[in-house]
Image (cartoon, coloured by chain):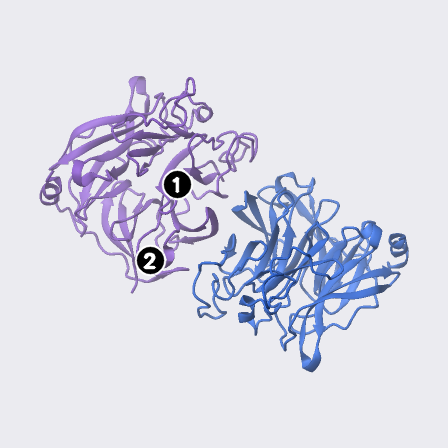
Chain colours: A blue, B purple
Amino acid sequence: MGLRTLCATALITAVALAPALSAKTIESERAEFKLSTIADDLKNPWGLTFLPDGSMLVTERVGNIRRVSANGEVSEPLSGLPDIVVKGQGGLLDIATDPDYANNGYVYFSYSEPGENDTNSTALARARIDGQTLVDLEVIFSQKPKVKSNAHFGSRIVFKGDGTLFLTLGDRYSRMDDAQTLDNHHGKVIRINTDGSVPADNPFLQTEGALPEIWSYGHRNMQGGTIHPETGEFWSGEHGAQGGDEINIDRAGVNYGWPVITYGENYGGGKIGEGFKKAGMEAPIYYWLPSLATAGLTFYSGDKFPDWQGDLFVASLRAETLSRLDIENGRVLHEERMLSDELGERIRHVTQGPDGYLYLLTDQGDGKIIRLTPSD
Amino acid sequence: MGLRTLCATALITAVALAPALSAKTIESERAEFKLSTIADDLKNPWGLTFLPDGSMLVTERVGNIRRVSANGEVSEPLSGLPDIVVKGQGGLLDIATDPDYANNGYVYFSYSEPGENDTNSTALARARIDGQTLVDLEVIFSQKPKVKSNAHFGSRIVFKGDGTLFLTLGDRYSRMDDAQTLDNHHGKVIRINTDGSVPADNPFLQTEGALPEIWSYGHRNMQGGTIHPETGEFWSGEHGAQGGDEINIDRAGVNYGWPVITYGENYGGGKIGEGFKKAGMEAPIYYWLPSLATAGLTFYSGDKFPDWQGDLFVASLRAETLSRLDIENGRVLHEERMLSDELGERIRHVTQGPDGYLYLLTDQGDGKIIRLTPSD
């Protein structure tokens, strides 16, 4: 479609090249690495995706999509976005490139979509890029119902690899009990085809009253999702209550228990739900107590850090750390926490670039894109 | 056999009632509890077992077995023990009561057994108790070969529940490569009948040159073992190299990799073996980096701490901590570390009493038996 060439030449309006972080080598359990700031002065960057020409698209929660060249030139915001509610935890959230981008040119982004009477919910749109503008915009999913809430929007967009995608959603905070019923999209993972239609093998198509997009339920606020590079399973991260951050392997039709079972408690204290276990509800495969406030996550499968292959990296906000979970056979064998000393910033997301490096987004008014590279 | 009555009246020679620890309530993630010192002034206590009358037998590494009444009266050492090598990590180690003690009166203990020319190895004996004396002593297993080494003796005695028992062993430090071959007992778990004979379904009976007692291999220095209360699986703890402490589910015939694969490195630095994974070798289900120096462990299955049921407790020496591992479906979901502040002593062992309380042994010249009880 020729879009890549067009974008690479037309989109980049240099703002400033970001200063490098200290070249200090960081020693970790399995790798020595350095941090480089690829771009900075981004307003609460939330999602990051890569285009075939080596450039990136980054979202700012305030409602901007910017293109960043491989060497860090940051464009002006693209135009052509839909209306976005920017308040509380809401705004422009994740962004993802179609696996078949080279042929169809689609990018997908999730955001807080306004409704009537000050309501909102998370929505998912796709569009193509023409120069500085989004074109062919389609809203392919809107979370139902819309409610008055500033919190728990999710969300991550993850391609399953079969022409469908997952979108992780939140319980909207004020509606946490909705996570247990199937007549709404609160506290759910949904699975749709990339055009927004419903796959014929979704788990609740035969369940009366259930919304057909639902893949799994009983979730709180899911800001992380990734596909296991070997098993193809969908692994999700859930930002829990105090002490309830979770990693789950998200399977079709399964109830993950929120808010009936949880390892968390209300902030400031106070029990939630019925305990830790209940028949018909799935325990997580790992949880944090105290909470880190987990956000984005990714499996590492690149060649730049051989001893990180197969490990799950989890970004966290409050703990300002990057957790490396050593995974074997669906078990977490060990956790290493990195960067809280060396970086000391809230980390919204971690993802792997096509170059095999890890990339972080720091959650600040002057947020950064940071690349991890081996020190030697 | 009337032994219990005899023991209860004859064995107790009061030394001193131990002072109580501070009655301070310790708040942990799932329980509030207090520590009580049941007995103190024990010389590096290593193993602890309970008799039907509520009293305990405790080993001191220097070669003593003492009886401790439920209210903390400590007897003089029993007589009638075999020769024991007390040096380095060697001495009198674990002790266990026969599941059918009420009928047969047997207790089992492991220890460092002397050989010719200053050699030694771990051995397992059983005996009955008559007053202050061990009688009917039989050495039912001797680790082969005996070598000159002061280290890595293991060992824990764990009844499988089918008339057999496991004994966990060490690689004797200087002979770590032996852990990979089946012609010796170094770095092995062995399984025998309680009379020392070999069970007919042990995994290597048909393997030429293999010692018939071997259950699993590729271990380093195993100071912990316990049966999962629901699955009946044998879970073991391995005191690894720097960074290599492991929890394994020990299955018949499986190779756990030491020293070919390990998460540890030599103390002071330096790689061991070939890495973390290899075909035909089993990864642990959990490991510690840095090492805690893990020792005894037990699943909690009592009624005194309902929110600890199913959790695996692991004692550690260097880290002076009691780890609580939250286990579901064979996975460690979460680790809580307790007592390093409140106790601050090396912990050799943790086990559950028939009263449903947890008991600890602290590893010092003035070592203690400590009981954990709910605070309310």
User: Which of the pair B276/A32 is nearer the observer?
Assistant: B276
What residue do we see at 37% from left, 31% from top? B169
- Quarter of the image holding residue A213? bottom right
Local packing at callout 2 (Cα closer than 10 Å; few below 14, some 14-19, many 20+) is: some
- Point out residue B290 in the picture as x, y percentages from the top left corner: 49, 43
Task: Please give left or right for residue B120 compared with residue B270 in the image.
Answer: left
Kindly identify the amino acid type of the residue bearing the numbered disc 1. Glu
What residue do we see at 65% from left, 52% from top? A226
What residue do we see at 46% from left, 31% from top? B254
Query: What is the count of numbered marks?
Result: 2
- Cα gap from disc 2 to disc 1, whole angstroms: 22 Å
Instruction: Look at mark 1 in the image and give the residue it sits on.
Output: B233
- Point out residue B313 in the picture as x, y percentages from the top left corner: 38, 49
**Residue B286 can be seen in this image:** yes
Residue B101 marker: none
Earlier sequence position, callout 2 versus callout 1: 1
Chain under numbered label 1 = B
- Point out residue B309 in the picture as x, y percentages from the top left corner: 36, 54
Task: Please give left or right for residue B216 compared with residue B53 in the image.
Answer: right
User: Which of the pair B254/A338 is nearer the observer?
Assistant: B254
Q: Seen from this angle, which residue lies furthest bottom?
A: A117
Kindly identify the amino acid type of the residue bearing the numbered disc 2. Phe
Q: Do the dots labelled 2 and 1 sit on one chain?
A: yes
Local packing at callout 1 (Cα closer than 10 Å; few below 14, some 14-19, many 20+) is: some
Q: Nearer the viewer, mark 2 or mark 1?
A: 1
Chain under numbered label 2 = B
Badges 2 and 1: C-beta atoms under 8 Å apart?
no
Task: Please give left or right for residue A49 compared with residue A350 in the image.
Answer: right
